[in-house]
Structure formats: structure tokens, C-alpha cells
Amino acid sequence: MIPLTLTPEEMKVIRARFEAKVAKSPDCWTWMGVAQTPGGRGRMRIKNRVYYAYRVAYVLEHGPLADGLVICHSCDNPACVRPTHLFAGTQADNIQDMTDKGRRRSKPRYGMDHHAVDVSDKHVEWAVAAYRSGGMTQTDIAAVLGVRQQTVSDWVHGRARTARAQGSAAA
Ligand SMILES: [Zn+2]
């Protein structure tokens, strides 16, 4: 992952491009430019690289993002780019957040190998729900949780109920 860093001059240009693609409401600000899926995460090309629009929004507001942090939505709306709805966290925070919300999120933008994610029963429940909803493949879910696809398959088929025993350590 290449961090998004901008000079003050670039900031001005990018901010103008960014603002032109945002529909602001009193609640969420919706990205109207290119998106991954309709209503999904917006994308913006900057200096020949593609970044998520909400990531650009965050950087424009707060400056460069520390390494290893991901952007989470407090509003749970992937198309939203309103800075006050965005917060930076670790991937583990992001998983906890989506687990708390009991909903699936899209797969993360980074490899998770540097994270030792402690897989709990809640994560198993989330993984099964995410798979059954049809929105994510087992491979996607495995990548989010840092476990093997086979492990997710086991959960989906009810072969393993105890996440901790069958999670990353055992996988
Ligand atoms: Zn929002």
C-alpha cells in the first residue's frame, strides 16, 4: 500500500477535484465519482494510483495516515466521504467495529499478515453471516480475519464451533 502524501499545492488541486464529486447532505456526504460498486466505496485516481475516496477525504482533512491504519465509517456507509464520519483505526478495530454492528463490511485493503487477530466466537458468527449473505467469498472473509479459507469453510459448514481452537493458531 502506497501511503497518500500530498504537497500543499497538490492538496489544493485534489481538494477541488474531490469537492466536485461529493454530494453533501446534512448527514452523509456521498461520493458521486467512480465507485467500486454502485453505492460502494468511491475511488479516486491520484498521481496514477487509485485510492479510496474516503481515504482521500481523511487525508485532506487530517493529513497523512499513519502506516497500518485503515479508515472506518462511523455511519457504516461505504460511499460516505464526510470527514466527521470517518475514523482511523487498526484492522482489528475495524473487525471489532463490524462485529459490534453485526454487519458485514467489504474486504480490507491490506494484507493482514502483520496482525495477529484474536478470532472470537463473535467473529465466527460474523464470518458465517457474511458468507450466507452472499456478499463475501470465503477467501475474502479469511483475509479479513487472518485465517485460512478452509477454516472459514469449516465454520460455514458448522464443523467448528470453537473459534479460538480452530482459528489462526490451528489453521
Ligand atoms: Zn456518513
Image: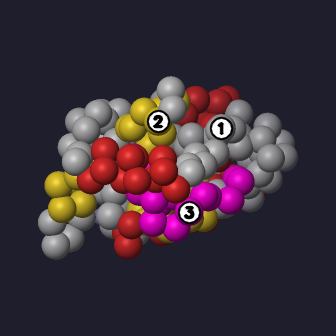
Q: Does the magenta stretch include residue 121?
A: no
Secondary structure mostly taken by the magenta-highlighted segment of the chain: helix
Is 5 or 80 nearer to us in this picture?
5
Q: Circle 2 is placed at which residue position?
A: 46
Mark 1 to mark 3: distance in Å? 17 Å
Question: Start and end of the magenta stretch?
Answer: 53-68
Is 170 or 11 nearer to us in this picture?
11
Asked whether the residues under the numbered discs 1 and 3 touch, taking CB atoms below 8 Å apart as contact, a structural biologist would say no
Asked whether the residues under the numbered discs 2 and 3 touch, taking CB atoms below 8 Å apart as contact, a structural biologist would say no
Number of the front mark, 1 or 2: 2
Residue type at mark 3 is Gly
- Going from N to C along the chain, the mark reached first, 1 or 2, is 1
- Provide the secondary structure element on which disc 1 rests: loop
Is 44 or 145 nearer to us in this picture?
44
- Going from N to C along the chain, the mark reached first, 2 or 3, is 2
Asked whether the residues under the numbered discs 1 and 2 touch, taking CB atoms below 8 Å apart as contact, a structural biologist would say no
Q: Is mark 2 within 8 Å of ligand 1?
A: no
Q: Circle 1 is placed at which residue position?
A: 1
Number of the label disc, if any, that sits on residue 63: 3
